[in-house]
Image (tube, helix red, strand yellow):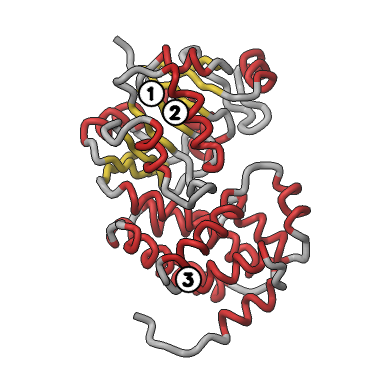
């Protein structure tokens, strides 16, 4: 029997992963909440809005019926923005069996309480539900274009990690496995905050030296928070930590970086968001990360200044000077 996977979220990343799975020979069903958008995908046989010029294989079908998703496969991959993660799982639950397996490629915290997304899976289904996160340095357009890519699949269930690897792994898409779900989640969420900071610095006209310093010191912030929440330090030096951080901070395919660039160039938050026209996960993640840092008494100065720019109206140039003017200390 052919492998099957149901993917929830018909934006650029959900579509890219659906294309990947289908090209690998997997029967794939892609769900989106907007019926008009799904109808367009069905007629066009490509995602002209978010991922144009990548035609759908015959084994990739689409639906706006979440009941159809649950009936199609017990393996569900969530690719919605983190703020919609809990709502999507709640919609899905009434239609699922006891054998459901949940993976997600969403990056962020639950906005209601700042908890990690694996906690939402456990609360909505059960602590025994096989769960996995897919993360790493990935842009949807490059995955869709079959450019070489490597990711991390983190799960405490080795059989589930293996199953996902068999579906996604190909000659141009390499999968690595991990058991550190928390570390991978933290890396994926906080790097978006730091990408906004890097974008701001570049928008202000600062150079490569500044960007390199922000990435390096930002990685330290990820490590501090990640370890406090239960992650493993080595995770943050891998694809889902340093790899994803470098990608998001340095390339303008990153919506978070482009948002930061606009802020640094003098646009306000609303104008900068409208110009992007898609979800900017780092905006909510800045608030959630800042609150977690306060809760656990963790020093995260780049995150703090980014939060103040976004939520307190701090001038970005002053934020940079606040970082540079901090008391001198040892690097480690």
Asked whether, in this view, residue 182 is left or right of residue 248, the answer is: left
Where is residue 232 shown, x and y percent of the image? 28, 58
* Tag 2 near tag 1, CB within 8 Å: yes
Q: Which residue does the image show at 50% across and 71% down from the upper left?
A: 212
Q: Earlier in the sequence, mark 3 or mark 1?
A: 1
In the depicted structure, whether residue 172 falls above or below residue 314? above
Q: Secondary structure at mark 2?
A: helix
Label 2 sits on residue: 20
Quarter of the image with the C terminus is bottom left
Numbered label tally: 3
Between the residue at mark 3 and the residue at mark 2, the CA separation in whole angstroms equals 37 Å
Q: Which image quadrant for residue 104?
A: top left
Q: Secondary structure at mark 1?
A: loop
Q: Which mark is residue 300?
A: 3
Identify the residue at the far left of this view: 158
Asked whether, in this view, residue 8 is left or right of residue 72, the answer is: right
Q: Which mark is residue 24?
A: 1
Quarter of the image with the N terminus is top left
Q: Which image quadrant for residue 313?
A: bottom right
Between the residue at mark 2 and the residue at mark 1, the CA separation in whole angstroms equals 6 Å
Q: Which residue does the image show at 42% across and 41% down from the upper left?
A: 148
Where is residue 102 shown, x and y percent of the image? 37, 30
């Amino acid at each position: 029997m052919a492998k099957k996977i149901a993917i929830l979220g018909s934006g650029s990343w959900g579509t890219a992963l659906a294309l990947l799975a289908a090209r690998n020979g997997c029967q794939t069903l892609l769900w989106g909440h907007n019926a008009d958008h799904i109808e367009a995908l069905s007629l066009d046989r490509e995602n002209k809005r978010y991922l144009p010029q990548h035609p759908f294989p015959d084994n990739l079908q689409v639906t706006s019926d979440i009941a159809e998703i649950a009936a199609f496969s017990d393996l569900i991959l969530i690719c919605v923005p983190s703020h919609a993660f809990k709502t999507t799982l709640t919609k899905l639950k009434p239609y699922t069996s006891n054998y459901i397996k949940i993976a997600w490629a969403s990056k962020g915290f639950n906005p209601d309480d700042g908890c990690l997304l694996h906690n939402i899976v456990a609360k909505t289904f059960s602590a025994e539900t096989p769960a996995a996160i897919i993360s790493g340095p990935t842009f949807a357009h490059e995955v869709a274009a079959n450019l070489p890519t490597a990711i991390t699949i983190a799960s405490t269930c080795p059989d589930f990690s293996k199953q996902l690897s068999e579906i996604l792994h190909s000659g141009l898409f390499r999968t690595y496995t991990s058991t550190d779900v928390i570390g991978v989640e933290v890396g994926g969420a906080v790097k978006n905050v730091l990408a906004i900071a890097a974008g701001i610095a570049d928008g202000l006209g600062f150079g490569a030296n500044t960007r390199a310093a922000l990435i390096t010191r930002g990685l330290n912030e990820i490590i501090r928070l990640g370890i406090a929440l239960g992650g493993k330090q080595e995770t943050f030096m891998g694809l889902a930590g340093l790899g994803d951080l470098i990608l998001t901070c340095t390339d303008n395919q990153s919506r978070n970086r482009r948002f930061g660039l606009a802020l640094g160039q003098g646009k306000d938050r609303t104008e900068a968001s409208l110009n992007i026209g898609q979800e900017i996960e780092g905006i909510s993640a800045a608030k959630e990360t800042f609150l977690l840092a306060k809760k656990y008494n963790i020093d995260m100065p780049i995150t703090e200044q980014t939060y103040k720019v976004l939520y307190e109206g701090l001038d970005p140039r002053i934020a940079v000077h606040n970082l540079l003017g901090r008391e001198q200390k040892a690097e480690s």
